Amino acid sequence: MSPEEFRVFGRQVVDWIADYHAGIESHPVRSQVRPGEVRAQLPAHPPERGEPFEEVLRDLDEVLLPGVTHWQHPSFFAYFPANASGPAILGDLLSSGLGVQGMVWATSPACTELETVVVDWMAELLGLPEHFRTDAAGGGVIQDSASSAALVACLAALQRVSGGDVAAKGITRRHTLYVSEHTHSSLERAARMVGIGADNVRVVAVDPGTLGMDPQHLDDLIAEDLAAGAVPTLVCATVGTTSTTAIDPVRAVGEVCRRRGVWLHVDAAYAGVAAICPELRWINDGVGEFADSYCTNAHKWLLTNFDCSLLWLADRGPLVDALSILPEYLRNPATLSGEVIDYRDWQVPLGRRFRALKLWSVLRWYGASGLREHIRTGVGLAQEFADWVREDPRFELLEPHPLGLVCFRPRFPELSPEQAEERTHEVMESLNASGELYLTHTKVDGRTVLRFAVGSPQTERRHVLAAWKRIQEAVG
Ligand SMILES: *Cc1c(COP(=O)(O)O)cnc(C)c1O
């Protein structure tokens, strides 16, 4: 494709995206296709000769679009938001256009240095501690996902607790990792991947009221494991669990970790970005004093399309030591001088995209004030929705709900618990099948609750109100 052809089709693609966003409400929120339906419409074999780009766009409209769930739809209330935005899309396009591989500083100095600036900016905006800044012992890095961030945090923790032995010899002792039942599954996957093993993931009890981790039980488990000769290696505290946005008591958990010499990873994948609003900064209480690593996703609620997960370390040393290898083909004077950062040593893959461009575009376009307004709008709408649920006796509201997620349950007092479970799932499926809104569920204390997550920049009060009316009707 020549630059002139690219110009023509590039304009068509940008127009396509603009039209898509402008007309997004004409689509059912959740894709209504059956398994295999998209694939059956696509050729079984790749084309032998090149085809005009118009054909690609036509298939996008006719074949693929029905199989798309519209995450940017203003009535998308499922999972957590995965915001896209104009500046983020354009930043991503520029990153693709440059086609840079930023594995080490020398392969594109701007890719590394802009990332450093952007993660330091974000640390400042979120009120994170000075030692997370690049000029101090720590530093931040953009990962593809919070799952990768958890994985490298485990590697760093193993490095620190073993004095480097794990990187050299592999795991030779029994290492243990601590989560609660509400911790994201990526932590157990990380434990499997680094060789700690799922059987050595200890599940700490939670306070039944807050669903936050019980620090006393954590301490008891660590003591038990030490007595049995294991090496307690990492505790994950969550700020805003995926299930219900419960917040673990990071400070009290951190005090246990500090006393026991265990790495504290704080997973704030969804909620952490809310700290851009000073009135919500309390969610990170204890992070500054106690976290060895801290992760939040710009790619959920902060208007930056996937992938853009931010990981900070209080001390980058163990991570870099765990992952740094310098083969001859990567040797270069800048790396050898020690004056530059090579972010390949902070992540699993060697190669890396110029991801900082999209976050930089977002930060410059909206400014801190625009981002705060976005978060506040989502929180405000969610609180209003919670008020409606609380006032309707047919529903039970799960408290607290300080951010953009509200969990609730229809009561069905005339039904048995099993029948009520079944009815709740039927209600949810009927709503989602209508295409008018999309919401998902979780389980709390063995009972299904519906999750209503507000956070799209397109969502207005009228969308939340319409969804609430539909939910009321579905319950009858
Ligand atoms: C979404 C989520 C994750 C996983 O995020 P990815 O970036 O998709 O890996 C991890 N932890 C929590 C608390 C989450 O909400």
Image: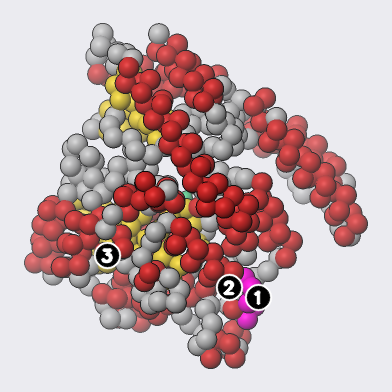
Residue at screen point 73% across, 41% down: 17
Report the magenta stretch's main SS: helix
Q: Secondary structure at mark 3?
A: helix
441 vs 167, nearest the viewer: 441
Q: Give the amino acid at mark 3.
A: Glu
Q: Which range is magenta?
A: 106-111
Q: Give the amino acid at mark 2.
A: Thr
**Mark whose residue sits in front, 3 or 2:** 3
Residue at screen point 77% across, 49% down: 46
For disc 2, the marked residue is: 112
- Tell whether label 2 touches label 3 (CB within 8 Å): no
Q: Quadrant of residue 290?
A: bottom left
Position of residue 306 in the picture relative to residue 94 (left or right): left
Q: Secondary structure at mark 1?
A: loop
- Residue 108 has which mark? 1
For disc 3, the marked residue is: 289
| Residue 445 makes an appearance in the image | yes
